[in-house]
Image (cartoon, rainbow, N blue to C red):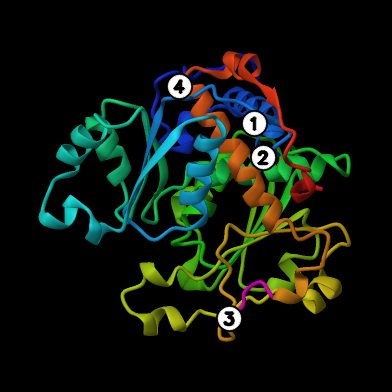
């Protein structure tokens, strides 16, 4: 595939994995690698000094919201936030169109999460500045998928493996999990992927995504057996039951705790270097506990490396859409006040 990007990032919305080809992903990752010294506090840049991020999260979020804000701050910009539907003018009946027209007048770029599928794209159609999708209902979460793939690439590279030929098991609520939907689309840009899709029958990956994966030439196995599905994979990608997407808590409770991964299961069934990932939050309540805390000392648990990578990936997207990639190093200064031990 050509190394030339098909996408012009400058001033563009980032709404869906459908926007990207492999060369675009490679470009994003190369910029993310350039951002690592700044995210790791080894250098400081003020390349977005004076710029404002509108961080508009109309659905509960901790990691994604703070990660977007942190990424923008590390580039020198300021962050203004709206959190919760009930705290916004949308609760008073304001349309997404009006909200977009107003908030885009206050911001240079907007990161947005909303509980309704397609809502971020609707918002973006009226925005006067670039909009980045931080998750729209059960639809997509493109920046999470990009940071997940960036993490997978780094984890595989440490053992001499590559994304082509990846073996991955996706486990849990594959019907409602927007992170696995976006990651599945992203994997279609690569070659010879083997996917084990592990879920209860009622929570399987949407059929159109399974067909998309197979049409790309990937091998897809659908199963409800955890042990056999994680025996020969490079990555175990676990997800929680998305209880907020169910009609009732009682319905969600039918599936909680079905596929629990702990150190005993890992040791018995996984290859020794299998990497464990999760988009977080992991549900640590006794009745769920899909990823046990006894894995915390396992060096192959990559969930916190994922969250660190989320900052550099989002820094890269901000730099690309605001066209400051070539200016970052020119504004760089060394950091003398921070040891960098957080990332050692």
Secondary structure type for disc 2: helix
Residue 312 in the image, given as x and y percentages of width and height? 62, 37
Q: Are marks 1 and 3 in contact (CB under 8 Å)?
A: no
Main secondary structure found in the magenta portion: loop
Q: Nearer the viewer, mark 1 or mark 3?
A: 1
Magenta residues span: 288-292
Residue 131 versus residue 183 in the image, above or below: above
Furthest residue in direction front, as rendered: 337
The disc, 4 or 2, on the residue closer to the chain's N-terminal end is: 2
Q: Which residue is mark 3?
A: 257
Which residue: 42% across, 25% down? 50
How far apart in space, not on screen, are marks 1 and 3 (Cα)? 35 Å
The disc, 1 or 2, on the residue closer to the chain's N-terminal end is: 1
Q: Are marks 2 and 3 in contact (CB under 8 Å)?
A: no
The disc, 4 or 3, on the residue closer to the chain's N-terminal end is: 3
Q: Is residue 31 left or right of residue 241?
A: right
Residue 225 in the image, given as x and y percentages of width and height? 67, 73
Residue 218 in the image, given as x and y percentages of width and height? 65, 44
Quadrant into which the N terminus falls: top right
Q: Which residue is mark 2?
A: 150
How far apart in space, not on screen, are marks 1 and 4 (Cα)? 15 Å
Secondary structure type for disc 4: loop
Q: Nearer the viewer, mark 4 or mark 2?
A: 4
In magenta segment, residue 289: yes
Viewer can see residue 222? yes
Q: Which residue is mark 1?
A: 32
How far apart in space, not on screen, are marks 2 and 3 (Cα)? 28 Å
In magenta segment, residue 271: no
Which of the numbered marks, if any, corresponds to residue 322? 4
Which residue: 24% across, 29% down? 105
Label 3 Cα crowd, 10 Å radius (few <14 / some 14-19 / many 20+): some
Number of numbered discs on residues: 4
């Amino acid at each position: 595939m050509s190394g030339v990007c098909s996408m012009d990032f400058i001033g563009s919305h980032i709404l869906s994995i459908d926007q990207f080809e492999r060369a675009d992903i490679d470009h994003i990752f190369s910029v993310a690698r350039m951002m690592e010294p700044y995210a790791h506090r080894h250098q400081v840049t003020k390349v977005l000094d004076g710029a404002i991020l509108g961080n508009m999260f109309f659905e509960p979020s901790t990691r994604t919201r703070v990660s977007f804000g942190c990424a923008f701050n590390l580039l020198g910009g300021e962050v203004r936030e709206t959190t919760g539907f009930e705290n916004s003018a949308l609760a008073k009946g304001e349309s997404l169109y009006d909200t977009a027209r107003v908030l885009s007048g206050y911001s240079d770029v907007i990161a947005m999460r909303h509980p309704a599928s397609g809502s971020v794209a609707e918002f973006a159609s009226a925005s006067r500045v670039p909009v980045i999708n931080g998750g729209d209902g059960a639809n997509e979460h493109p920046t999470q998928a990009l940071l997940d793939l960036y993490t997978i690439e780094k984890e595989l590279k440490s053992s001499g493996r590559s994304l082509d030929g990846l073996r991955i098991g996706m486990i849990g609520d594959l019907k409602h999990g927007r992170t696995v939907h976006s990651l599945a689309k992203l994997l279609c840009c690569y070659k010879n992927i083997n996917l084990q899709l592990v879920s209860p029958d009622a929570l399987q990956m949407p059929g159109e995504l399974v067909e998309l994966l197979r049409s790309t030439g990937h091998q897809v196995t659908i199963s409800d057996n955890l042990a056999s599905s994680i025996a020969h994979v490079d990555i175990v990608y676990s997800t929680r039951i998305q209880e907020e997407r169910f009609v009732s808590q009682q319905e969600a409770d039918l599936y909680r705790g079905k596929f629990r991964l702990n150190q005993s299961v890992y040791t018995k069934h996984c290859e020794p270097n299998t990497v464990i990932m999760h988009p977080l939050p992991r549900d640590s309540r006794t009745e769920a506990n899909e990823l046990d805390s006894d894995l915390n000392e396992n060096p192959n648990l990559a969930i916190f490396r994922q969250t660190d990578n989320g900052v550099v990936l989002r820094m890269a997207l901000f730099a690309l859409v605001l066209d400051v990639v070539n200016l970052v190093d020119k504004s760089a200064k060394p950091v003398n006040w921070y040891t960098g031990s957080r990332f050692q």
